[in-house]
Image (spheres, rainbow, N blue to C red):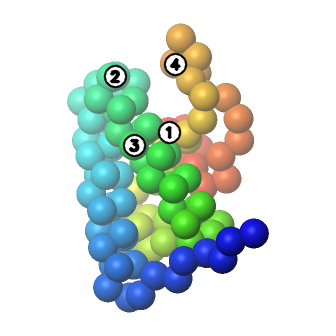
Amino acid sequence: MSKNVELDAAMKQRVVDRLAWSLKAFHDAEEKTPGGFESLSWRGQLGGFRHALDITVGRQATSEILHVVRCKTGLGFPHVGPVTDSGDIFGFDSEATPGL
């Protein structure tokens, strides 16, 4: 099993800033058109970023970074997972804010 990458302070800040920017974009899109194409696209980008981060730095470090982003923005993360044609999302997402 490979070892996780440890981010230095500058890189961690870049990751936090990028996630914060993407999370704000999701919330802006969701406010304009709830469940619309743009918010769905941002939801997918956030999910992909989170999963890639988890693979790279590990679950605990990812959770810590997401916590910093939540504190910085005051915004919750949307649920990510498989989406049906009707827009319902399956599965459990421990990092998601209920109702998003």
Residue carrying label 1: 100
Q: Amino acid at mark 2?
A: Gly
Q: Secondary structure at mark 1?
A: loop
- The crowd level at tag 2 (other Cα within 10 Å; few <14, some 14-19, many 20+) is few
Image quarter (top left, top right, bottom left or bottom right) of the N terminus:
bottom right
Q: Earlier in the sequence, mark 3 or mark 2?
A: 2
Distance of mark 2 from mark 1, alpha carbons? 13 Å
Which secondary structure lies at badge 2? loop
The picture places residue 63, in percent across and down from the top left corner, at 58, 68
Residue carrying label 2: 36
The location of residue 56, given as percent across then percent down, is 55, 66
- Mark 2 or mark 4: name the one nearer the start of the chain: 2
Q: Amino acid at mark 4?
A: Gly
Between residue 73 and residue 9, name the one nearer to us.
9
Check contact, mark 3 vs mark 4: CB within 8 A. Answer: no
Report whether residue 92 is seen. yes
Tell me whether the residue at label 1 lies in contact with that at label 4, contact meaning CB atoms closer than 8 angstroms: no
Q: Which sits earlier in the primary sequence, circle 1 or circle 4?
A: 4
Asked which quadrant contains residue 41, the reply is top left
